[in-house]
Image: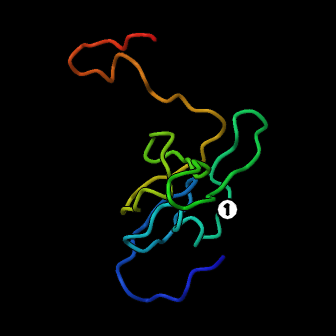
């Protein structure tokens, strides 16, 4: 896979695993990482196998990454922005469901 030559549009600076990466404004995080020759976005919880984008349209969830400290983000569905910090997601990550997500004090009722 390679990016077609492009010289239009502004570029933004993104950080992936602590390293700078230039991307085009309007690119998804997945497109920017692939264009930067980064293929492994996450590891699986069970075997630790590497995964990267497969469908590029939000169906497969193989492109999950951590963006600005928030895990479980689909890289193929989020546009890059200047200063964004992206990390690989290693194994399972807490999905963040808890009482702190309910602003009005409601609690989730177990099924």
Q: State how the image is colored.
A: rainbow
Element on which disc 1 rests? loop
Which residue is pictured at 48% across the width and 46% down the height?
73
Task: Report the front residue among 88 and 60.
Answer: 60
Q: Position of residue 66 (x, y in %)?
A: 51, 45
Q: Residue furthest front?
A: 111
Q: Residue at x 57, y 32 (%)?
A: 93
Q: Nearer the viewer, residue 102 or 8?
A: 102
Q: Position of residue 43 (x, y in %)?
A: 69, 44
Residue 99 drawn above or below residue 17? above
Q: Nearer the viewer, residue 11 or 105?
A: 105
Tell me if residue 70 comes above or below residue 41 in the rendering. above
The mark tally for this picture is 1
92 relative position to 83: left or right: right
Q: Which residue lies at the image location 37% right of the left edge and 72% below the top edge?
A: 25
- Residue where numbered disc 1 is placed: 39
Q: Is 7 situated left or right of 49 in this image? A: left
The residue at 33%/20% (across/down) is 100
What x and y, as percent, mark residue 58? 50, 53
When the figure is inspected, residue 45 is found, relative to residue 17, above or below; the finding is above
* Residue 3 image position (x, y, % from top left): 57, 80
For the N terminus, the quadrant is bottom right
Above or below: residue 12 compared with residue 79: below
Quadrant for residue 90, please give it.
Answer: top right
């Amino acid at each position: 896979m390679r990016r077609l030559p492009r010289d239009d549009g502004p570029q933004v600076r993104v950080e992936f695993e602590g390293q700078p990466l230039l991307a085009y404004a309007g690119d998804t995080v997945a497109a920017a990482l692939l264009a930067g020759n980064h293929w492994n976005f996450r590891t699986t919880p069970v075997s630790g196998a590497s995964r990267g984008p497969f469908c590029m349209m939000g169906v497969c969830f193989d492109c999950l990454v951590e963006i600005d400290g928030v895990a479980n983000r689909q890289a193929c569905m989020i546009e890059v922005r200047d200063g964004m910090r992206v990390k690989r997601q290693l194994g399972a990550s807490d999905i963040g469901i808890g009482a702190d997500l309910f602003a009005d004090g409601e609690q989730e009722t177990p099924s």
